[in-house]
Image (cartoon, helix red, strand yellow):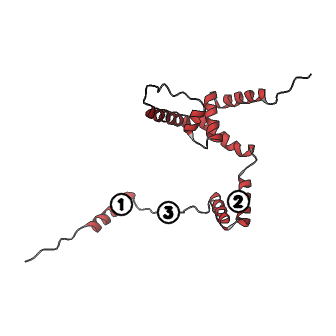
Amino acid sequence: MAEEEVLFEDNIDETEEKERGKFGLTKQQQLFAELYVLVNGLNGVDSVVGAGYKFGDYSNYPEDKREWYINLKAKQIARHNLKNPKICKYIKYLQDNMGSQIGVNRFYVIEKLKNLAEKGTESTQLKALELLGKSLAMFTDVKEINDTKEDPAAIMKKAFEERVNKDKVVNFPVGG
C-alpha cells in the first residue's frame, strides 16, 4: 500500500521560516502580526494573548485586579510590538497581500459598490454611494490658503491688538 501523501505540511514550516527570515521576526512576533491583521481585526491586546505572550505571575494579586493587570501588560506588549519596525513592516506586507490572496482588490470592491448603488434599496444605494464617494476622496474638505507676504509676527500682533480692543471695557464717569 502506497504511503499517503501529506499536502502542504512541510511547505508550511518552510514558508514560515522564509517569512520570519525575510522580516527578522521570532515565531511569536510573526504570530502576533498575523493575528493582528487576519483574525483579531487590528486588536493588539487580543493578538498578544493569542500569540501566547507571558504576563508574569499575578497569582498574588486579588482576583478582581488580576485581569486588569494582565490587560495592562498585554496593552504594553502590543504597544511595544506595534512600534517595532520589523513587525510593522510584516503587518504592512500582510495587509498588502491579504486582498490578493482572497481575490478581492480595490476594483472589485468599487465594482460591487457601483452595482449596489444602481440596484439596491434606497438605503443601500445611499450607503454604497457614500462609500464610493469616500473611496474616491470626493468629500474631502478643501481649505483656501492665502499666500501673503506679510510678516507672521505682524499678523499675530494685529490679531492680538484686535482681540484686546474688542475686549476693552469702557468706563463711563459716574456723575453727580
Task: Say which residue appears at 59% left-offset and 43% top-offset.
Answer: 42
Residue 172 x/y as whole percent: 16, 74
Please give the residue where the numbered disc 2 appears in the rendered image: 113
Q: Is residue 4 left or right of residue 154?
A: right
Q: First in sequence: mark 2 or mark 1?
A: 2
Q: First in sequence: mark 2 or mark 3?
A: 2
Check if mark 1's residue and mark 3's residue have beta carbons within 8 Å: no
- Is residue 121 shown above or below 6? below
Q: Residue furthest front?
A: 63
* 165 or 116: nearer the viewer: 116
Neighbour tally class for label 3: few under 14, some 14-19, many 20 plus, Cα within 10 Å: few
Q: What is the C-alpha distance between the residues marked 2 and 1? A: 51 Å
Amino acid type assigned to the residue bearing label 3 in the image? Ile
Q: What is the C-alpha distance between the residues marked 2 and 3? A: 34 Å
Amino acid type assigned to the residue bearing label 2 in the image? Leu
Q: Residue furthest right?
A: 1
Q: Is residue 132 left or right of residue 7?
A: left
* 60 or 157: nearer the viewer: 60
Please give the residue where the numbered disc 3 appears in the rendered image: 145
> For the C terminus, which image quadrant?
bottom left
Disc 1 element: helix
